[in-house]
Image (cartoon, grey):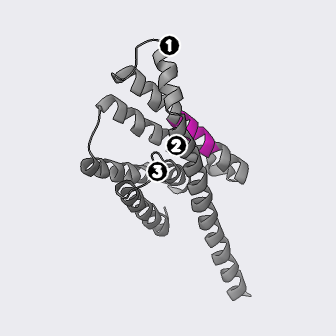
Amino acid sequence: MKKSNIILIITLSLLVFVARLIPHAPNFSPLISVMMFAGVYSSSKKYLFLPLIALFISDIFIGFYKIEIMLSVYSCLILAAVIGQLLKKQKNIISLASGSLASALLFFLATNWAVWFFGDWYTKDLSGLALSYSLAIPFFKNTIISTVLYSALLFSVYEGARYLISQKKLATTK
């Protein structure tokens, strides 16, 4: 793996850490996008865990919550990285947008199911599950907007920089 990609994933992991500690809208986070980005550009699976380590460290400062719900959050983020790995061979606007939306939807469905199933806020019936999902819709809106926004930013800046660097190299070799 390129050293520059490792440094970039470490930098993005630090961004995840800082983004969780500063005031922000609920569920408006770069985390899903960073995990997907790490999945696309990391050639070694061990680097996929750097953003998760940053998340865990930030959880030390913010506070832990019910372990089963935490595991659903962390699992969904790992799945976002897997989606990123699946996109490696076909990186384009449509696949990256689809991957971002799929990751956000998966996060919404799985984590709110976990809150319903493992938490004690909702009744353990379909009515409770429906209430769990309906009350989470404002958070889902923020998840979708932030995931699409941060993915667009991360991937376009990275690919744009790669393109400009390749053009400069071509210009200097002529």
Residue 36 is left or right of residue 111, and the answer is right
Mark closest to the chain's N terminus, 1 or 2: 2
Question: What's the amino acid at mark 1?
Answer: Leu
Mark closest to the chain's N terminus, 3 or 2: 3
**Residue that carries the numbered disc 2 in the rendered image:** 80
**Residue that carries the numbered disc 1 in the rendered image:** 126
Task: Identify the residue shown where x is 67% and y is 71%.
Answer: 163
Gap in Å between the C-alphas at discs 1 and 3? Answer: 29 Å
Q: Residues within 10 Å of mark 1 (few under 14, many from 20)?
A: few
Mark closest to the chain's N terminus, 1 or 3: 3
Gap in Å between the C-alphas at discs 1 and 2? Answer: 27 Å
In magenta stretch: residue 105: yes
The kind of secondary structure element at disc 2 is: helix
Question: What's the amino acid at mark 2?
Answer: Ala
**Residue that carries the numbered disc 3 in the rendered image:** 25
Residue 45 is left or right of residue 94, and the answer is left
Question: What's the amino acid at mark 3?
Answer: Ala
Residue 97 is left or right of residue 8, and the answer is right
Task: Identify the residue shown where x is 38% and y is 48%.
Answer: 52
Any part of residue 85 in sight: no
Residue 114, above or below 33: above
Gap in Å between the C-alphas at discs 3 and 2? Answer: 21 Å
Do tag 1 and tag 2 residues touch (Cβ < 8 Å)?
no
Residue 72 is left or right of residue 61, and the answer is right
Image quadrant of residue 155?
bottom right
**Region of the chain picked out in magenta, as a range:** 99-107
User: Which one is closest to the eye, mark 3 or mark 2?
Assistant: 3
The kind of secondary structure element at disc 3 is: loop
- Residue 46 x %, y %: 40, 50
- Residue 125 x %, y %: 45, 11
The kind of secondary structure element at disc 1 is: helix
- Residue 157 x %, y %: 61, 67
